[in-house]
């Protein structure tokens, strides 16, 4: 079991704060006409300016600083010359490494203005993440997190992507245990103080099935429906949780 000391959690929070600041800065930067590669470049340079390393770069051969996934792209989008259009949604998912520790955070951004239906979908995805995070405390189980996320998403008529999951995180981007966005209450590993988890629901407006594009990375919904994704890195504390990718 991978339990982090208070010192290690403080280091992860340093990395996580960079993640948070860069996400905040991206809000104003995302506009119709900008390319997904420009977003990737901006993330890379800002993370480095703030003293971190964008550790997606080179991870299992990933070519960019960040995963930039548009509309029906679920995860692992690779920024290129594609220009964002008004009404698109774009997911920015990137990790920051600092002093040997990782943090992982994702947000879904609306480009310009979108329909009320799309705004509602993105909002439900973010709230489903917090429903999952609220379960975190010593004695709770991994299944409680996925159960809360999927109940909330299904209640609002969306599906939950099952092919990608959250994960433990620390000195490595991906550690044990897996944190699925579905599950049964009271099942799975028991959470203990000092565990650190990336909780990251990926929802689809249509069906949950995904396929990976020929680039070997980018997953898209097979029905081309929109997908949203939010992610925070959290620590299990004595009484509950602490979000490490925050202010
Ligand atoms: N940040 C992703 C996650 O949430 C993983 C990125 S894969 C990489 O787990 F190849 F881009 F690093
Ligand atoms: Co991530
Ligand atoms: Co993650």
Image (spheres, rainbow, N blue to C red):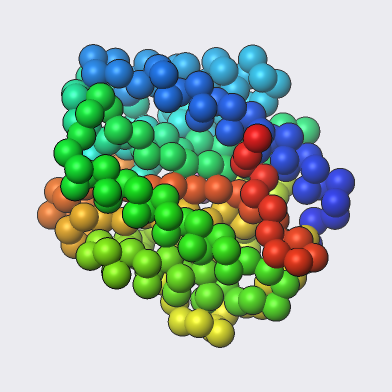
Residue drawn at x 27%, y 49% is 120
Kindly give the residue lying farthest to the bottom in the view shown. 186
Kindly give the residue lying farthest to the front in the view shown. 116
- Quick check: 136 above or below 11? below
- Quick check: 224 above or below 45? below
- Quick check: 114 above or below 9? above
* Residue 150 image point, x, y percent: 38, 69
* Residue 140 image point, x, y percent: 64, 76
- Count of marks placed on residues: 0
Q: Is residue 2 left or right of residue 38?
A: right
Identify the image quadrant of the C terminus.
top right
Q: Is residue 1 left or right of residue 37?
A: right
Residue drawn at x 43%, y 66% is 149
Residue drawn at x 13%, y 54% is 223
Q: Is residue 191 left or right of residue 20?
A: right
* Residue 216 image point, x, y percent: 32, 43
Q: Is residue 170 visible?
A: yes
Q: Which quarter of the figure has residue 4?
A: bottom right
Residue drawn at x 20%, y 43% is 116
Q: Looking at this view, is 228 or 102 the one in front?
A: 228
* Residue 87 image point, x, y percent: 19, 31
Q: Looking at this view, is 159 or 95 the one in front?
A: 159
Q: Which quarter of the figure has residue 90?
A: top left
Q: Is residue 211 visible?
A: no
Identify the image quadrant of the N terminus.
bottom right
Q: Looking at this view, is 240 or 212 the one in front?
A: 240
């Amino acid at each position: 079991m991978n339990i982090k000391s208070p010192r290690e959690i403080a280091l992860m929070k340093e990395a996580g704060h960079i993640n948070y600041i860069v996400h905040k800065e991206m809000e104003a930067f995302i506009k119709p006409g900008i390319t997904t590669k420009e977003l990737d470049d901006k993330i890379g340079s800002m993370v480095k300016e703030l003293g971190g390393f964008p550790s997606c770069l080179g991870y299992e051969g990933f070519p960019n600083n960040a995963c930039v996934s548009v509309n029906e792209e679920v995860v692992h989008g690779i920024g290129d010359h594609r220009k964002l259009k008004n009404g698109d949604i774009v997911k920015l998912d990137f990790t920051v490494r600092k002093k040997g520790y990782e943090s992982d955070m994702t947000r879904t951004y609306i480009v310009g203005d979108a329909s009320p239906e799309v705004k509602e979908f993105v909002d439900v995805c973010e709230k489903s993440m917090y429903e999952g995070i609220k379960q975190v405390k010593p004695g709770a189980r991994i299944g409680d997190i996925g159960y809360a996320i999927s109940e909330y998403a299904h209640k609002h008529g969306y599906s939950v992507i099952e092919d990608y999951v959250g994960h433990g995180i620390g000195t490595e981007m991906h550690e044990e245990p897996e944190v699925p966005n579905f599950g049964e209450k009271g099942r799975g590993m028991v959470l203990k103080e000092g565990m650190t988890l990336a909780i990251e629901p990926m929802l689809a407006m249509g069906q949950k099935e995904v396929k990976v594009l020929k680039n070997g990375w980018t997953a898209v919904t097979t029905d081309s429906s929109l997908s949203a994704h939010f992610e925070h890195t959290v620590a299990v504390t004595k009484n509950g949780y602490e979000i490490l990718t925050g202010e």
